[in-house]
Image (cartoon, rainbow, N blue to C red):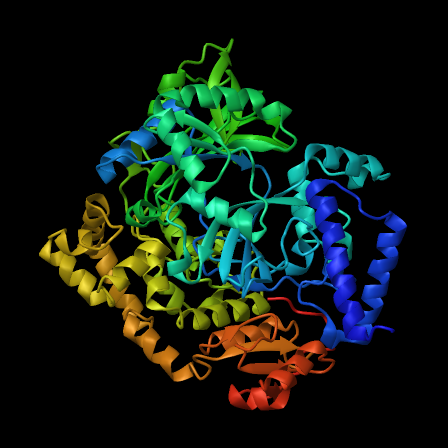
Amino acid sequence: MAMNAKEEIDKLTSELKVYQDKYYKEGISLVSDSEYDRLSDRLSMLEKEHPELMHPDSPTLRVGSDLTNDFPEIRHTIPVLSLDKAYSDEAVLDFFSKSIDKEGGLLSFAAEEKIDGISMVLYYEGGLLVRAVTRGNGEIGNDVTANIMTIHTVPLKLSEPVDIAVRGEVFIRKADFEHFNESESDDAKKAANPRNLTAGAVRRQKSSEARLVPMDIFCYEGFWSNKDETPPDHISILSTLKKLGFQINPHLSFFADTKADAEEKLKAAGLEGDAYAFSEIDEYIKRKTAERASLPYEIDGLVFKINELDVREHFGYTEHHPRWAIAYKFESPQAEAKLLGITVQVGRTGRITPVAEITATKLGGSTIKRATLHNQEYINELELAIGDTVSISKRGDVIPAVEAVIEKNNDGNTTYKLPDSCPCCGSRIVQIGGLQYCQNYDCPDQVKGRISFFASSDQMDIEGLGPKTVAVLYDAGILKSIPDIYSADFSKAIGLPGIGEKSIKALENGIKESKDRPFATVLSSLGIAEIGKKGAEMLIAGGFDDIDKLIAAAKDGSIEPFVSIAGIGETTAENIISAFRSSELLTMIEALRSSGLKLDASLDKQEKSEERIFEGQVWCITGSFRSFNPRSKALKEIEKRGGRTVSSVTSRTTHLLSGEGGGSKRADAERLGVKIVGEDEFLSLIGKKDAAAGPADGQLLLF
């Protein structure tokens, strides 16, 4: 008896999944390549004829698509931060001991290889992969789901229907990289290293091309939507991820007070790994450093994490990194260069930073001409002089730094000394701790720095007001302070270098839009030490939800209202009090208040509550649209009105926004009784007119 389409699709899907798993996870071929291709082609043809019968984790999704990706921006729902760094085994041991002292009891620590790849977050709903998002800036990344689906070690469907976010590192093994480069006939197209090839593949415009790059992934953190389902510690998370179908790095090490304790905990979690006592940290780092070259993939360090999740929650996060983990970085690559000179920079806080000007030197795949020297004390330690031959490294493989003097100069130059006066304004430089500062608040370089910081994309995001434009406007006397942004006559700038009528119009629009930024953004943009975005959010959550409360608390002078907020210590509290007692800051705040900026979080809440018409609703999107191209614009309209967006129609979906060419999602919505909303109705709901945005591309959007 002949099978119907559904039966055949189900059978082919099941068979091909078995073949894929055996081949990519165990290296076993159960059928010939030609037979596999025949079955895959048959399934693909049936799915095109009957899109409503396609499985959400179909093996054909591994093949990719020839449609062009637009990589919409997605806001992360979990912390995606970088790690604090250590460069010695003593620093790692110090992290262990300080953590134990802070907790007041014994802890255990997991140690994992730091894969040199591309950080990725995989989001699953009901056990199905709904989106894969790059790390981005830690808050917002790019949706690269179509490309990540082509990686065979990324499970499309988990063994359990859980809602979970999983962090992992996408990478390419050394042998696969060499083979891929050898197959590339054009030398100009060959990648410099596996990481560069991975980064390019993740952002290929067509997922059918990404499929051809041999990417792999190790997963290392899981975040359950239902906190009750979260395992109690890190090694239990790894064990659970493995059971769900994720590939974890098999080279796990574990530290406890004694080796026996470490072995017992690994066994209890059902994981294989190397057990160590805390006293063996130097031995472990030496062994891993020696093994680095022989590993089948590139690593650039080791990651040490507190194992107990309740302790992690207690320790919390800084604005940049978790307090419960540290990355040990292997010795950075070094090169030799000649010190040609030293430039003295003045930052927005007045800090004086010496920068080495060196002969152009190749290092870590780039040409270096400048390197940091930190401060005068560091220069003294090196006994550094102009003309010396020095070694240069990339600390953390990112920041070029002068590490040592290899050969002294023959010119008789002695150890360099920073000038006694500011190179910008001539004010006397003073030393505070180990750092030097210009204390003239009106120093031009400081003013330009403060304005540039305030207007930057990570702060008030004022289009057209970058550092170069700020410098031109300042030097012309048009822009002398942050409040001037909202009162200056920028028409006077037309004709200045790089400034025309169009750029001024864009700038004025950017300034107008910045007045809608929420209080948290305004607060973090003021440039107060240790009040970045996270700090501003902590203060607001802790009751300081308008600027006047901060001013009043600072005037009172007690640190207690601040240190009572989780994550704020005494130093941060003292900085806040000092800043909000400053006459310069208070004057600026009043000027910004008069300009109409939001200095009260309740104004943000009021606006949001008026717009959240999709609160509690779950929306999916299909097809192409006149007014939303790319379609990520429609997703943003839903999300900013309180709705949640998903990539597939399920029983939990409440609305489907359906454009032209909608396929299986519309059929699923009709079958499940989901409300289907057309483009015109949607535009009416959000109070917008049809603003046709050019021809629709019909691209499948995966969120």
Q: Is residue 676 above or below residue 357?
A: below
Q: Is residue 125 above or below residue 317?
A: below
The residue shown at (24%, 47%) is 572
Q: Determine the residue positioned at 32% across, 42% down.
A: 350
Q: Position of residue 291 (x, y in %)?
A: 57, 22
Q: Quadrant of residue 524?
A: bottom left
Q: Is residue 149 above or below residue 429?
A: below
Q: Give whichever of 140, 501 is nearer the camera.
A: 140
> What is the quadrant of residue 99 in the picture?
top left
Relative to residue 156, is residue 402 depicted above or below?
above
Q: Is residue 290 left or right of residue 551?
A: right
Kindly identify the residue that appears in the image at 74 percent across and 67 percent down.
10
Image coordinates for residue 90, horizontal then vertical, percent: 36, 23
75 or 580, nearer to the observer: 75
**Left or right: residue 315 compared with residue 664:** left
Could you say where residue 364 lies in the image, as x and y percent from the top left? 61, 30
**Residue 83: image location, x then y, percent:** 43, 41
